[in-house]
Structures are given as structure tokens and as C-alpha cells.
């Protein structure tokens, strides 16, 4: 998905919910959560999207690459920015 479209989806989710928690994860959220999944293609996307969330601690680029390389790279294991309505 194009980064521009991901930004639109993030902004729409933020508009629709009063409080949103963002987490960097390698799994999909359980269906019981009102959530949005943004599959990350690059560390630059993570840096860009993290600007929407003051309390999101992101790893350094080196830590991110290490996290990614330690996971099996099937689509379900790609790094994700998961947004949860709380």
C-alpha cells in the first residue's frame, strides 16, 4: 500500500476514535479489538507514522533491522504499526 494511503487510513482512524494506542508488533491484533493494521515496508515509514503518536517509543534503525531479521519473513511476520481504540 502506498504511504500516502496509509497516512489517510491512520488519520481516519484517529478521527473516528477519542483515544488510540499505537504499538509496533509482528502479529495481527485479535478480532475482538477495534484496530487498524499498517504493515510497514521501511523504517522511514515507522518514523513518519510515529509522529502521530506522542507516546510511541520506536527502536533505532539498527534495532528495527535486528528485530525484522530475527522474524521469519512471511506476510504475517512483517512489522506492523497496530492501532487500537481504547
Image: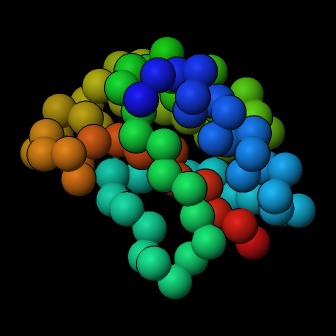
| Residue 16: image location, x then y, percent | 81, 58
Closer to us: 22 or 9: 9
Q: Is residue 74 left or right of residue 49?
A: left
Q: Residue at x 75, y 39 (%)?
A: 11
| Residue 29: image location, x then y, percent | 44, 67
| Residue 17: image location, x then y, percent | 82, 62
The residue most toward the bottom is 32
Q: Is residue 86 left or right of residue 66?
A: right
Closer to us: 19 or 63: 19
Among the 4 quarters of the image, the one containing residue 12: top right
Q: How is the image coloured?
A: rainbow
Quadrant (top left/top right/bottom left/bottom right) for the N terminus: top left
Q: Is residue 26 left or right of residue 60?
A: left
Q: Is residue 47 visible?
A: no
Q: Residue at x 49, y 16 (%)?
A: 44
Q: Residue at x 58, y 64 (%)?
A: 35
Amino acid at each position: 500500500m502506498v504511504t500516502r494511503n496509509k497516512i489517510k487510513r491512520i488519520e481516519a482512524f484517529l478521527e473516528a476514535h477519542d483515544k488510540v494506542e499505537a504499538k509496533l508488533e509482528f502479529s495481527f491484533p485479535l478480532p475482538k479489538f477495534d484496530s487498524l493494521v499498517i504493515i510497514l515496508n521501511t523504517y522511514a515509514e515507522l518514523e513518519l507514522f510515529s509522529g502521530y503518536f506522542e507516546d510511541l517509543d520506536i527502536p533505532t534503525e539498527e534495532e528495527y533491522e535486528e528485530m525484522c531479521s530475527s522474524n521469519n519473513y512471511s506476510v504475517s511476520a512483517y512489522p506492523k504499526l497496530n492501532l487500537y481504540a481504547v
